[in-house]
Image (tube, coloured by chain):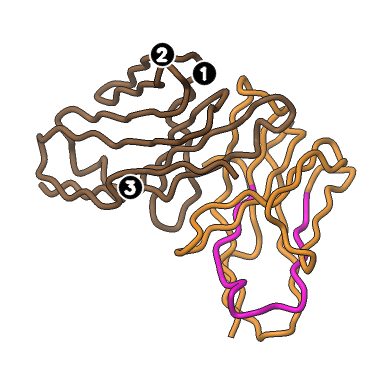
Chain colours: A orange, B brown
Amino acid sequence: DSGVTQTPKHLITATGQRVTLRCSPRSGDLSVYWYQQSLDQGLQFLIQYYNGEERAKGNILERFSAQQFPDLHSELNLSSLELGDSALYFCASSYEGSYNSPLHFGNGTRLTVT
Amino acid sequence: TQLLEQSPQFLSIQEGENLTVYCNSSSVFSSLQWYRQEPGEGPVLLVTVVTGGEVKKLKRLTFQFGDARKDSSLHITAAQPGDTGLYLCAGTTGGTSYGKLTFGQGTILTVHP
């Protein structure tokens, strides 16, 4: 158990809809990262928050947004969903943002867009 | 765009055999990590290498970071069925973007008893 909790585990929704994925980091971790894993693209970095502030951005679509709340949990919002957004979405956390502070991944949310 | 190419994509071997997985890039990375992922779970960190030429051992697993910090390898000695899984390499440019990992496509390893 990594200590990172992601909800829900599975989500099935229709194209055009909006969903929210939630992540609770390990106790004490300040950084939260979101990754998308699909068969054709592999694991892709989306965005990182550190102590409530955006720190790094990757290949995140404009239809996607995220935030980290004062209690350090994070939410990833996906809107105007398309079939191609179907993927596993992972949240990871670390104490800070250096190689001395490894990432711990949750078990992901599997999103299916029909 | 930094890319990490992993090879082979698939590896099916018998228990007791040795194997090597390669991770190559044209970019220099400040650190290279190896993860193992099982179905229904997130990746789990195995090792981080940060110095060119560095070799780290974890029981039957040996990890090497290339001298130029552009490539890495994972060698498993006497593979066991419990080693079955998806192995991923990931690189970072470090600094404040340490967690902004670039992942390879992964190697699916199956070890048959």
For residue B41, the mark is none
Percent across and percent down for residue B110 are: 22, 50
Left or right: residue B57 compared with residue B60: right
Q: Are marks 2 and 3 in contact (CB under 8 Å)?
A: no
Whether residue B13 is in magenta: the answer is no
**Residue on which the image places disc 1:** B50
Q: Are marks 1 and 2 on the same chain?
A: yes
**Residue on which the image places disc 3:** B107
For residue B54, the mark is 2
> Is the residue A63 above or below the residue B107 in the image?
below
Magenta region: which residues? A74-91
Q: CA distance from mark 1 to mark 3?
A: 22 Å
Q: Amino acid at mark 3?
A: Thr
Instruction: Bin the neighbour count of mark 3 within 10 Å (Cα to Cα): few under 14, some 14-19, many 20 and up.
Output: many
Q: Nearer the viewer, residue B23 or B86?
A: B23
Circle nearer the N terminus (2, 3): 2
Q: Amino acid at mark 2?
A: Glu
Percent across and percent down for residue A20 are: 75, 67
* Tag 3 secondary structure: strand
